[in-house]
Amino acid sequence: MTKQATTAQKLWMYEKMVTSRRFEEAIARIYLEGKQPVFNMANGPIPGEMHLSDGQEPCAVGVCVHLTAGDIVTATHRPHHQAIAKNVDLKRMAAEIFGKSTGLSGGRGGHMHLFDPAVNFACSGIVGQGLGPAVGAALSRKMQGKPGVAVAYIGEGAVNQGAFHEALNLASVWTLPVVFVIEDNAWGISVSKAASTAVPHNHVRADAYAMPGHRVENNDTLAIFAAAGEAIERARSGGGPSLIEIETSRLAGHFMGDAEAYRPEGEKDGLVAKDPIPAFRRHLLESEGVDEQDLVLIEDRARDAVDEAIAFARQSPDPDPADALSGMFVETAGKGADA
Amino acid sequence: MTTEIKENERKLTIARAMAEALAQEMRIDPRVFVMGEDIGALGGVYGNTRGLIDEFGAERVRDTPISETAFVGAAVGAAQDGMRPVVELMFVDFFGVCFDAIYNLMAKNTYFSNGSFRVPMVLMTSTGGGYSDGGQHSQCLYGTFAHLPGMKVVAPSNAYDAKGLMTTALRDDNPVVYMYHKGLQGMGWLGTERGATVHVPSDPYEVEIGKAAIAREGSDLTIVSIGIGVHHALRAAAQLETEGVSAEVVDLRSLVPLDRDAIRASVAKTGRLIVVDEDYRSFGMSGEIIATVAEHDPAMLKAAPIRVAFPDVPIPFARVMERHCLPDADKIVAAWRTIQPGARS
Ligand SMILES: Cc1ncc(C[n+]2csc(CCOP(=O)(O)OP(=O)(O)O)c2C)c(N)n1
């Protein structure tokens, strides 16, 4: 019962993908400020590691288009596209990436630690770390009798963590509303999937945990939409977890500054030629019959949203340095069952 | 200071010194092999395995899946079976996913088996912040490893010690945790601590594990540290010298075993103690150093000892907040000002 995406859904996905790409372009540009000619990660308005999501946008939008703010997403160290598709506040997200006081966490977290409770979004920096919390959130909804599906995003490298196998088994044995989404960009930093993973495709691992497994080839936004729609529907209706592996492409380095000498000659060019965003644009124009004017409007809106978020981040004040020492614990809201 | 920097002699970064020690030992000992993430073609994110795959091939320089539990556990098994594995945990912060293999197996099997099983392996791992990598990529955690019995723990502050400690670790029949600081590696993209890049002899040599070095002699104050803290201490000592204060800097080089005699000898001379530690303040190295003195003879202290350590909060991302927390030379000098010289003399 694969549902087709409506035109409205397609345009939403396009807008989110374009927003994400414009955002990454802006971050990439600003990241290099203060880091040239000498590249020192500590310098510039955005210090630290920076993992960009260029090329992986379809994985974010094709799944999150089916989610509401109440649904849960646990994201990865490469989280910007996922956050944008989950409607994380773009201004406060940008400010967090700049380490500003107006950021989602007042600058405590940074780009790998984005938390937005309004849309049930969190991410973190350890590979495979979001899997357990997604299972737990799904368990909580089930125990409370509340609706909601949890989506755990991981990279294909994370399937070789013990946490992956433990989480899939637990979600399955307790029939929890979780969807595990693998963004397979074929590389874990410099180590290829082929060199690290015993099976060519990871969706087959679903068999081991008695859940449906599906692979989407070719970074295809609409095929992701269809596979995710089915898995999320199954989770919502009490059918339990699913696993989806999406063949996607990492158009940037693992992190900014990565020379990518480990990539075979020409691989990158091939990926750029298959950039999913222009491909989806062509689909909208040629098959969906969308007016180019409408796409231009969307593109302008995406650019404006990014410009506004970046300006907000730049203009926001730094946190008070001594504020680093506060916030270790919160006040307990109430006692026990009265809370 | 062990590291005599001679003019016109070859200087190496810590990254290169580590790789050289590994290569030289691999040439003479076929049991030594290296496993970890991105240590092959990439040469390690921090450069400490660069060139090894070209010389020794993928059989002895093994890129692993992101499966720390499996490959650290595998190193224990291989070590017990007669190999001498070196495993790299890319960031010490990642120990969380594989600590069972480290502290319950690697560290305990020698004792449990009454020495009938040996675990000659080296776990090398990067530590430290200061470049806004956030709270899961910036910790030191020296104290965590040193607290749990059964592992030797070393942390070089310069390339001479880095090579010698690595060679010694590779030849040791016990597990050694080798904690290198990202800010000292000499990788440009992490900034450059010039004092860490020093003369390194070409031939293999050992630096004894468990022996501190006096990085600078002094008579008024003892500053004890390890790794990058030694460089902060040396800068502070240089500044204090301009004020007529003579500070001695003790570079521990290893936490397990801890050179308690060197600490006590220095404090016996100076009577004043500042401990500098980029690891969390409480329940860690800084408290252990102070206890080492206090348990021995509290009367040696002419003033209350001071810790310049990372406060007990996760490492914040924002540069201004992280800087607020990290030890540096200014904080050491400020600590000195709170000591009342002569109060008990
Ligand atoms: C437990 C753990 N091991 C290693 C790392 C270092 N690391 C960060 S990202 C990464 C590669 C992850 O590959 P993948 O899961 O495929 O995601 P991608 O980076 O390709 O998006 C590695 C090894 C980590 N963060 N956590």
Image (cartoon, coloured by chain):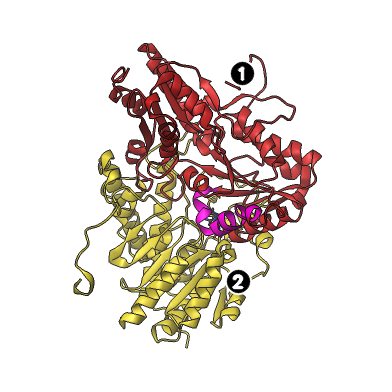
Chain colours: A yellow, B red
Q: Chain of mark 1?
A: B
Q: Quadrant of the C terminus of chain A?
A: bottom left
Circle 2: residue type: Asn
Q: Is residue B174 left or right of residue A78?
A: right
Residue farthest bottom in this picture:
A1
**Badge 1: residue crowd in 10 Å (few <14, some 14–19, many ≥20):** few
Q: Chain of mark 2?
A: A
Secondary structure, mark 2, is: helix
Magenta region:
B91-111
Q: Is residue B217 left or right of residue A110?
A: right
On residue B4, which mark appears?
1
Circle 1: residue type: Glu
* Residue B271 visible in the current orientation: yes
Q: Please identify, in this view, whether the residue under mark 2 or under mark 1 is nearer the observer.
A: 1
Q: Is residue B92 magenta?
A: yes
Q: Is residue A203 left or right of residue A24?
A: right
Q: Is mark 2 within 8 Å of ligand 1?
A: no
Residue A26 rendering spot, x and y as whole percentages: 40, 48
Q: Which residue is mark 2?
A: A202
Question: With respect to residue B177, does B235 lie above or below?
Answer: above
* Residue A33 visible in the current orientation: no
- Per the model, the C-alpha gap separating discs 2 and 1 is 54 Å
